[in-house]
Image (spheres, coloured by chain):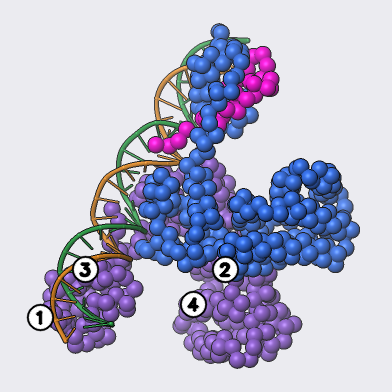
Chain colours: A blue, B purple, C orange, D green
DNA sequence: AGCATGAACTTTATCCATAAAAAACAACTT
DNA sequence: AAGTTGTTTTTTATGGATAAAGTTCATGCT
């Protein structure tokens, strides 16, 4: 059966809005809620119905008002707000990065399905999606081959990344003066400087900034294939670092400084300087990844 | 039910080998056949069993020998040797390129499933696989968006293609003298010259050469992401030209000449010359694609 | 006319079932 | 010991079913 994670997530959102006073007095109309939550009206209605049933809100001649206060255990547990497909992704990445899955291992859909507690279909869809990351390969009628999260992989990944980013950074720096992206870049620079001040405690926030920064650079002259490639990068880094936390603070601080230099270079509009800062940053990112790959292998 | 296309294709292969005398006297063992056909022994046995049943071969104390001659209607029809997934691919590409499918159209899995006569699962798997080509986009819980086989698409595609191919061609030309790829390149050049002589009648053969040529260039310094991207190119071109045959002979002849120049440049090891020939060829390929895109829109 | 709710209908996400194909095991032959 | 064939077990490719979520149609209220 299809999971009701969409409903549960929406329910939690509305509940937390009620809780911290974002919804005072009469509740908005179903249509308005639908717009705000990004779900269908059908789902909104289901949420409202449950809110009434639990006496969190009351409905009197077509008007809905908050009734009792939201309680900690009104919320659905987080795990129930994540669709199966996402769970499969997480479990697979854990299996791949943490288990002792060696390059050359073959992947068995049925076995994974049993292990993850889902139907084979879900596994297969995930693997098809995942195959574009270049880490697995399909052999028809037979199964999938895990090629390994290896040094080669990282080298090939970064070779492309450098090409793309040099190209995008260059084009970014050549934008007209009046492009709104310059403003966005300036704002991002401030965010970087701010984070640097608080790096001791907030170093986790770097990952978000990193993403924003690299995506901003691509915005100057969009190319769907570059965007797609950046999805691979984000994905890999997201999971990789989730299981490899050594030196995180130190690493992020260094990267933050490199970004600032890189931003300065962009703002200078000087092509040579841009290329240099870009290369320096990526070389260091690559070195970091390589170091932790080696750690993985031991 | 799973199709038995693997068996039928294998059967046809064995039958045609019997037919044109590639299998004389005693047939090879099951294991040997399995190796030659690239299928499992289970399938080989099924084929043999059917060959016996139809009296195409006879089995006497463990020895199998051809019996009656293979007849034209011993073969299974082609359509039955293609797996469902491939049919879905073909039908989808036809729907996309030939129908009046406009950019922005939304794609309905259920409707396509009905239209193509397959289960929704098959459609969904195809769409997931296909999404990496950048022509469709998934909107969760809602469906897929067809972004259009547009001019933008072609421009973005070629931007990347030029980057990749300049890089690969350069690296190819810098290979050591004793690399076996130089021999392969020389052979390919001969194939080009040969085809040029017979271009009037054999111009369809160009497509195969084109593929071999571009893949050879990537072989000098492999990168899985570049390979993957080349899959996109091949796929797109395969289907696009399948429904767009105008000027085919003329186009292929021109491309053949460009390839020859390009090969000469590679053999010269002169970087500037290589880059120039590479750019020239890709510019012309792009122009061709663009021209037919415009034709599509009318 | 334009927005709100109610109800009916359609599509997606997910699980389950099964024949075909592959792989593993077993017994036999040279 | 290595290669054959026979048999059993496992896995993949494909179809089908259904609750949840999305969409459309209908009705009623300012």
Sooner in the amino-acid sequence: mark 3 or mark 4: 3
Sooner in the amino-acid sequence: mark 4 or mark 1: 1
Disc 2 with disc 3 on a shared chain? yes
In the image, the segment drawn in magenta is A1-30
| Quarter of the image with the C terminus of chain A in it | bottom right
Q: Could you say which quadrant of the image residue A244 lies in?
A: bottom right
Q: Nearer the viewer, residue A185 or B272?
A: A185
Foreground mark, 1 or 3, reads 1
Label 1 SS: loop
Number of the label disc, if any, that sits on residue B224: 2
* Residue B105 visible, this orientation: no
Foreground mark, 3 or 4, reads 3
Q: Mark 1 lies on which chain?
A: B
Q: Disc 1 to disc 3, how far (Cα)?
A: 19 Å
Tag 1 residue: B61
Foreground mark, 4 or 1, reads 1
- Determine contact: label 4, label 1, CB under 8 Å: no
Number of the label disc, if any, that sits on residue B46: 3
Question: Residue A152, position in %: x, y?
Answer: 60, 69
Q: Could you say which quadrant of the image residue A109 lies in?
A: bottom left
Tag 4 residue: B208
Badge count: 4
B127 left or right, relative to B172: left
Label 3 SS: helix
């Amino acid at each position: 059966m299809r999971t009701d994670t969409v409903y549960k997530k929406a329910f939690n959102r509305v509940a937390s809005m009620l809780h911290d006073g974002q919804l005072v007095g009469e509740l908005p109309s179903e249509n308005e809620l639908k717009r705000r939550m990004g779900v269908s009206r059908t789902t909104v209605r289901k949420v409202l119905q449950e809110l009434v049933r639990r006496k969190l809100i009351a409905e009197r001649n077509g008007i809905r008002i908050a009734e009792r206060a939201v309680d900690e255990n009104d919320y659905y547990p987080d795990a129930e707000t994540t669709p199966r497909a996402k769970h499969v992704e997480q479990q697979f990445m854990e299996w791949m990065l943490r288990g002792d899955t060696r390059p050359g291992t073959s992947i068995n859909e049925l076995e994974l399905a049993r292990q993850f507690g889902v139907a084979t279909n879900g596994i297969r869809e995930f693997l098809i999606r995942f195959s574009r990351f270049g880490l697995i390969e399909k052999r028809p009628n037979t199964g999938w081959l895990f090629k390994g999260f290896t040094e080669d992989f990282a080298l090939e990944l970064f070779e492309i990344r450098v090409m793309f980013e040099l190209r995008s950074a260059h084009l970014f720096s050549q934008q007209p003066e009046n492009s709104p992206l310059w403003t966005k870049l300036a704002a991002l620079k401030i965010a970087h400087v701010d984070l640097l001040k608080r790096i001791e405690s907030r170093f986790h926030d770097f990952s978000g900034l990193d993403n924003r920064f690299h995506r901003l650079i691509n915005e100057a002259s969009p190319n769907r294939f570059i965007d797609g490639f950046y999805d691979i990068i984000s994905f890999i880094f997201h999971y990789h670092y989730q299981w490899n936390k050594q030196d995180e603070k130190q690493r992020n601080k260094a990267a933050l400084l490199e970004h600032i230099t890189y931003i300065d270079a962009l703002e200078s509009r000087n092509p040579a300087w841009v290329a240099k800062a870009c290369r320096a940053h990526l070389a260091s990112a690559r070195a970091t990844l390589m170091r932790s790959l080696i750690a993985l292998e031991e």
